[in-house]
Amino acid sequence: MHCRVSCSSEVRPRQDSGVVPANSHASPNAAVGRSRGILHGQAILAAALAAAMLSPPMISAQSQKGGTLPPGGTDSNWVTPARTYEGTRYSPLNKITTDNVSSLQEAWSYTTGIKDGHEGQPLVVDNTMYMVTPVPNKLIAFDLTKPGPAIKWEFSPPIDVASYGKACCDTVNRGAVFSNGLIIYNVLDNHTVAVDAKTGKMVWRTKLDNVETGSTITMAPLVVGNRVIVGNSGGELGVRGWIAGLDVKTGKVAWRAYHTGPDKDVLIGANFKPYYKSMQGKDMGVKTWEGEQWKLGGSTAWGWVTYDPETKLIFYGTSNPGVWNPDMRPGDNLWSTTIFARDPVTGQAKWAYQMGPHDMYDYDGVNENIVADIPMNGQTRKVIIHADRNGFIYTIDRTNGQVLVAEKFKPTNWATKIDLETGRPVEDSSKATHQGKLTKDICPSASGAKDQQPAAYDPETHLIYTPSTNLCMDYGGIETKYIAGAAYVGAAVRMYAGPGGNDARGEFLAWDPATGKKVWGITEKYPVWAGALATAGGVVFYGTMDGNFKAVSAKDGKELWKTHFESGVIGNPITYIGPDGKQYIAVYSGVGGWMGAIVPGDLSTDDPWAALGAVGAVPDLKQDTKPGGALHVFVLPGS
């Protein structure tokens, strides 16, 4: 279902200096959703165990070192989630350098009044900044030509409050995209909305799924040509994962590809050529499941989508298979934990690569796939770079899906290596999980060696700069029954610090994707749950869960500047040029998400199994940060 303009919505023009209106707080239902559904309910389970036509070749897009800018993109703007189609999160701006970043000052800030996890990143389009809040998913436009925060207008989308309790891991939103004069983003209740960037009035609204089934949408869309690429969430509620292409002008669904089931549903045709034999064959999305479990098979696409203008393919990954209890779904469970390459116009798959056959650990494969050309062994290779939850960073030939490099980047013991001949992990059977058995000391934990928090790629250093997590877990499978819209997990998880202990539960690191080796790393007390920004000034930015926002040297990781926020950082920094010609940095604060749920939800630390194990991972986080939600903008002083 889709509707245009006549749908109920609210736009409020604003001339004030950014005072939060009385109704800007999330409804009481959001507080219920915070301690919510799946996260909260895992205490019970614990007790039982103790992503018209494409315009080839994108003539209006701008190719430059560090990636290709979509139409509307300039050095001054930030119009798509990762700035470039390729997902590099690299900016050629160099007014902020290693020499002067220590003088960075906050220019202005804006408090949202919503004390939930603030993931994602703002957009900047021609001297207007746009931010999307967590539920109720407001879109706020700021006039950058005036002293900030100067609100131009606010848009409040219609939203089904029933969605609040369906979100697995906080009612977050990972941001918007600008295209064709529209700001396009997803609302938690399975709608994609397009709003006029100048007026704040809704242009179209499309319903993509039903809240009653447990499906929600938290990901940031990507626009490629005439297609808006969107995927769903809900792998912990027995949904069937999908990705869809919408018409950018009308919102009508042009295609939808499911990630389980027969080839016709997955949009696999004659041109689909997976590199590895185990992924070849007809209807593998059925044959690699027992019975009809594929209909409840999760495999959602709630992470990031990237695009290669050269091959004209989009890349994205799928989540865990449903249910978490692996004994309830024998087989490889295709196409869960899989990277897909697809035609954005038709949705047809070109190749796919599954990282975790028969996933036993909730190692979603949704993390970003950075498109890059890198020097390897005396030649330039066309690759995607993928840091996975499973503890391995993959360098993959983006033309065919062949794994070139796959090495561990955090403590990992569920597998010894990735066999480059077969593409499959070489697993340690002693770390396998089963129903009725508690398997201890599995590394990394279900939250992964890195979750969706996006890395950045610097074309000068040819390194990626990535957040990471150092946690391990105890995991046990539990028999469970499917009830539509209810938690369908079938496992209990307890997470705790990995090697190095509580003072080393996170690391921000530089990685060479050509060699598969770490170049440098910065140890952090908590998991690094914020994204990265790399700049031509040689400075890399990232934030921490306990509220620090840092600038470090891209060369060696040396800390150059730091500030502190009242609430932790799980958002992704951006940079832009303001109307005054100065370079600015912007980032959200507001701790939450899966790993930070203990803070906004005020969860008890008594049960380390609660919140799908997150409570046990960071029981001390409430001591070091507070609930909150704000946008912070920084600039160098003077001219």
Image (cartoon, grey):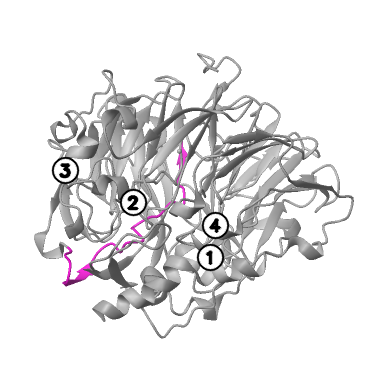
Q: Which residues are magenta?
A: 433-459
Residue 571: x, y in percent?
Answer: 56, 55
166 displayed left or right of 111:
left
- Residue kind at label 2, given as amino acid type: Asp
Can you see residue 525? Answer: no
The quadrant holding residue 182 is top right
Q: Residues within 10 Å of mark 1 (few under 14, many from 20)?
A: many
C-alpha separation, residue under disc 1 versus residue under disc 2: 19 Å
Q: In the drawing, does residue 393 fall left or right of residue 91?
A: left
Mark nearer the N terminus (4 vs 1):
4
Q: Nearer the viewer, mark 4 or mark 1?
A: 4
Residue at point 45%, 60% (across, down): 168
Residue at image x 34%, y 61%? 488
Q: Is residue 101 above or below residue 610?
A: above
Q: Report how many numbered discs are placed on residues in the image.
A: 4
Task: Give the SS element for disc 1.
Answer: loop
What residue is pinned by disc 3? 424
Q: Is residue 568 magenta?
A: no
